[in-house]
Image: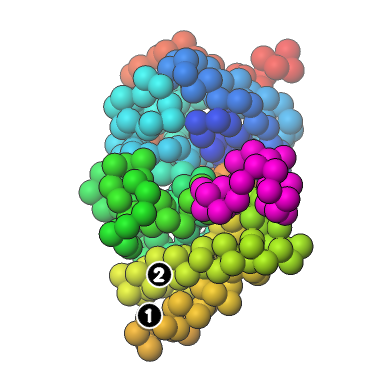
């Protein structure tokens, strides 16, 4: 029987769990709204409950470990979540130690963007490559770098903050406080802001019609462009330029075999691709211009597949095993399963 792992994708809005096979197949899946404002204990309780329910839905399967993708900053080697802005009260939380003790299984932790990068490298658009630059373009811009067959961590696991490369000296201030961040000019949020600024409520534009005369989002721009709206197509042309600038930096910095673009804005990749490629052709040194730039394949499950790969394929750092000298009183997964059937 193939090995399976229990995977968690911990976000500030949604907590997702799955049983995942070594082939990257999602065998069972559940999600709940994250109790993000209630502190670590509440979220850990949610993770325990999801683990029990996933086991109940996966008869005959025994996970060999737990992989967790979580928002940074975090330290994947020590298993500590340092201070994620989307999770209230999480300051130097030893998530792996707590989770491993409660569920009785070895566990591994990775930045959520790195987990998605691993998922796409192992089982998605980056299959077969040795080095992959994964970029997620959504509300913000994040990503992860697989270099020579290993995820790039850097000091305390903080490498790969792609969204905070400075690519211009102008534009809106990023939430990090700087001006000119890749995220501040090329994220889905930035695209929506430009579209909102270029239109007015009740102006009869396609963009304002799609937004019900409210603020326009990046999704609205992609939808309008797909319908052939000239204003939306021009906005996507600007978006493609900035993405191309950022991707050129990644090519020069990391020399990947492939760049994989995920996130909500990747739904419009076919509309962006020619503009991205034109900018890369213009700005990249000749040796880098032939590197493929493609859309991600795993969608919203990339992080779960990557988190499971931490256990199933030995990606990331070492696993943290439960400490037999400590007994928190929590049940093991086998006990949980027994209790649910009992």
Local crowd size for mark 1, using a 10 Å CA cut-off: few (<14), some (14–19), many (≥20): some
Local crowd size for mark 2, using a 10 Å CA cut-off: few (<14), some (14–19), many (≥20): many
Q: Is residue 197 magenta?
A: yes
Judge by depth and name the residue closer to the eye, 214 or 19.
214
- Residue at position x 74%, y 66% in the image: 228
Q: Residue 293: tell me if it is visible.
A: no
Q: Is residue 131 above or below residue 139?
A: below
Q: Is residue 66 magenta?
A: no
Judge by depth and name the residue closer to the eye, 4 or 114.
114
- Residue at position x 43%, y 30% in the image: 86
- Corner quadrant of residue 234: bottom right
- Residue at position x 74%, y 17% in the image: 341
Residue lying farthest to the right in this orientation: 227
Q: CA distance from mark 2 to mark 1?
A: 7 Å
Give how far across and how far down residue 279 sits, in percent.
46, 77
- Corner quadrant of residue 95: top left
Left or right of 165? Residue 337 is right
Judge by depth and name the residue closer to the eye, 269 or 180.
180
Residue lying farthest to the left in this orientation: 155
Give how far across and how far down residue 70 sits, in percent.
45, 37
Q: Which image quarter is the C terminus in?
A: top right
Left or right of 265? Residue 36 is left
Residue beneath disc 1 = 283
* Pointers 2 and 1 in contact (C-beta within 8 Å): yes
Residue beneath disc 2 = 245
Q: Which residues are magenta?
A: 192-218
């Amino acid at each position: 029987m193939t090995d399976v792992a229990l995977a968690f994708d911990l976000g500030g809005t949604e907590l997702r769990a799955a049983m995942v096979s070594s082939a990257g197949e999602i065998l069972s899946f559940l999600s709940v709204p994250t109790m993000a404002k209630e502190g670590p204990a509440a979220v850990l309780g949610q993770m325990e409950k999801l683990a029990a329910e996933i086991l109940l839905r996966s008869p005959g399967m025994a996970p060999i470990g737990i992989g967790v993708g979580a928002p940074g900053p975090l330290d994947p080697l020590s298993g500590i979540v340092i201070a994620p802005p989307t999770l209230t009260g999480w300051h130097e939380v030893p998530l792996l130690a707590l989770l491993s003790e409660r569920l009785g299984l070895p566990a591994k932790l990775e930045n959520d963007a790195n987990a998605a990068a691993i998922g796409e490298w192992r089982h998605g658009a980056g299959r077969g490559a040795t080095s992959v630059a994964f970029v997620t373009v959504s509300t913000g811009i994040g990503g992860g770098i697989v270099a020579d067959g290993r995820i790039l961590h850097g000091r305390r696991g903080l490498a790969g903050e792609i969204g905070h490369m400075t690519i211009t000296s102008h534009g809106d201030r990023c939430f990090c406080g700087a001006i000119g961040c890749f995220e501040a000019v090329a994220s889905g949020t930035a695209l929506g802001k430009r579209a909102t600024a270029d239109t007015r409520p009740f102006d009869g534009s396609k963009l304002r019609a799609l937004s019900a005369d409210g603020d326009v989002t990046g999704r609205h721009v992609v939808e309008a462009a797909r319908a052939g709206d000239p204003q939306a197509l021009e906005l996507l042309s600007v978006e493609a330029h900035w993405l191309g600038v950022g991707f050129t930096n990644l090519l020069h910095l990391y020399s990947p075999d492939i760049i994989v673009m995920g996130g909500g804005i990747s739904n419009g990749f076919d509309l962006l691709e020619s503009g991205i490629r034109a900018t890369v052709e213009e700005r990249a040194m000749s040796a880098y211009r032939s590197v493929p730039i493609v859309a991600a394949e795993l969608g919203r499950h990339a992080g779960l597949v990557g988190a499971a790969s931490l256990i199933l394929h030995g990606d990331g750092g070492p696993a943290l095993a439960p400490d037999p000298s400590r007994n928190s009183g929590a049940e093991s997964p086998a006990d949980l399963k027994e209790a649910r059937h009992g």
